[in-house]
Image (spheres, rainbow, N blue to C red):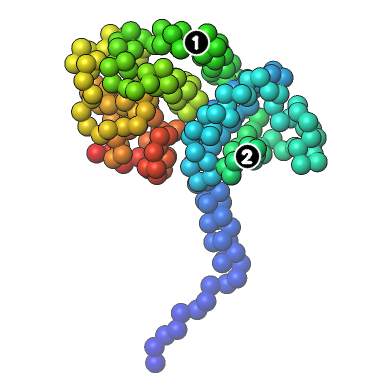
Amino acid sequence: MGRTKKNKPRHKLRGLHDTGQRRSTKARAAQIAWTPLKQACGCVVDWGWSSQTADPMTFSNWCISRPIMPCPWHTAPVAGASGPDLPNEITVQPRGTSVLLHVRKAAADRHELGAELTSRLAHLMETVSQGEAAVLDDAPAGFRSWLIANTADPVQAWLEHELCEIILNQGRGALPRELLEHLPEQLRTSSPKGPQLGSAACNICSFSAAEGGILCACGHDWSCHPGPAGQGEPCSHCSCADMQHV
């Protein structure tokens, strides 16, 4: 007669289930891209988004208004709970949308970055209030020439690029401003080779590729993803769900 395999004890099955749950929770946490911002109340908080519940455009639009608003812990009661009663990390749904965003109290080592990103965002919004000419004048000369020659709306393209770097990339730039200031002539006057990408931020990826940068399968440079390579990070600008080097 053949031997039968004994069932695993229930306590071992529970242990496997608990381990799986912990791994699943850890994986979900790793997929959230966090951006620290200083809010009107003086608190620095991390705002986060995941491709499973939100999109980069909605996240960026939400973050633009955060510096002039108090944080959730210093605002009107949320769902019947006052600020002190809220946990240190919560999920919010911006009014009029179906997306879910994350927010948590930022650790002390994130406060300096939060203040820097908020300052950059305030400068960008102040420039926008001065009109389109001021926005375009704020762009590095070489990249400005490229935008004028290769995009239908160079002002909007530069604005998208800046919001991508400040909010989605937490201040990291795909290329240094000095290189954008003195963009090679061949890149200024013709569209970059390779994938035809949908925004100025994505065009930066093409410039990065021309300088030896790393591209994933969707055509974006690694710095346009919300986290480090190799962690299942989604792309900031398209439906690419993971970093796939080519």
In the picture provided, is 38 more to the left or to the right than 127? right
- Residue of label 1: 131
- Residue of label 2: 96
First in sequence: mark 2 or mark 1?
2
Q: Give the x, y percent position of residue 150.
A: 28, 21
Nearer the observer, 97 or 242? 97
Q: Give the x, y percent position of residue 104.
A: 64, 33
Please determine whether, in this image, residue 194 is positioned above or below residue 25.
Answer: above
Please determine whether, in this image, residue 159 is positioned above or below residue 18.
Answer: above
Q: Quadrant of residue 184?
A: top left
Residue 211's mark?
none
Nearer the observer, 131 or 196? 131
SS at badge 2: loop
* Kind of residue indicated by mark 1: Gly
- Residue, x 71% and y 24% (percent of image)? 70
Q: Where's the N terminus, which quadrant?
A: bottom left
Please determine whether, in this image, residue 87 is positioned above or below residue 169.
Answer: below
- Residue, x 58% and y 57% (percent of image)? 18
- Residue, x 28% and y 30% (percent of image)? 214
